[in-house]
Amino acid sequence: MVDMSGLANTDGQTTEEKLQNAIAGDDIELLFKREGQEEVFFTAVYKQGITFEWVKNKVAEQMEANYADLSLYFNGRRIPEPFCLIDMGVATGSEIIVQVAEGAVLGHEALRAQVLAELAEEEGKAGEQ
């Protein structure tokens, strides 16, 4: 029988967070840079067992970008999202390069402006019919 007493919510963490902490490995600090730029725009600490899918989602939130508009690179190679940090040999202090797709919209205000423009265009077409 498995002893689940260690997963009791006595420290404010959810069961999922406790499981992640128990099996996900050591902490790794990652440094994120945009492609073609030298300055780090985002740093974060993740567990070794976290997937790059999760990491990419957090980068997209930070950049206020669409997930699909971003690609992550480590040591010049594109990172497949299902891989974990440990799968790619990523260590603390590793630089992850973020490539933004051409035509991607960054920032919620820019996205809002794009959506409003598209709605106005659709309304204009509907009025012509």
Image (tube, helix red, strand yellow):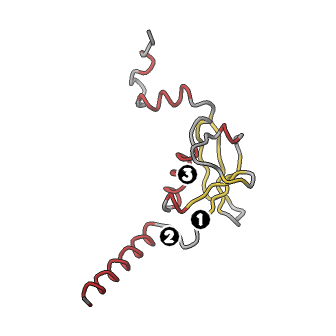
Asked whether the residues under the numbered discs 2 and 3 touch, taking CB atoms below 8 Å apart as contact, a structural biologist would say no
- Of callouts 1 and 2, the N-terminal one: 1
Give above or below for 68 relative to 11: below
Q: Amino acid at mark 2?
A: Val
Circle 1 sits on which residue?
A: 100
Q: Secondary structure at mark 2?
A: loop
**Residue at the right extreme, as displayed:** 75
Give above or below for 121 relative to 21: below
Give above or below for 20 relative to 38: above
Q: Secondary structure at mark 1?
A: strand
Residue 129 image-quadrant placement: bottom left
Q: Give me the residue at 45% from left, 12% from top.
A: 2
- Of callouts 2 and 3, the N-terminal one: 3
Categorize mark 3 by other alpha carbons within 10 Å: few (<14), some (14-19), many (20+). Answer: some
Circle 3 sits on which residue?
A: 56
- Of callouts 3 and 1, the N-terminal one: 3
Q: Give me the residue at 26% from left, 90% from top.
A: 128
Give above or below for 82 relative to 100: above
**Residue 105: mark:** 2
**What separation in Å lies between label 2 and label 3 (alpha carbons)?**
16 Å
Q: Is residue 83 left or right of residue 109?
A: right
**What separation in Å lies between label 1 and label 2 (alpha carbons)?**
9 Å
**Residue 114: mark:** none
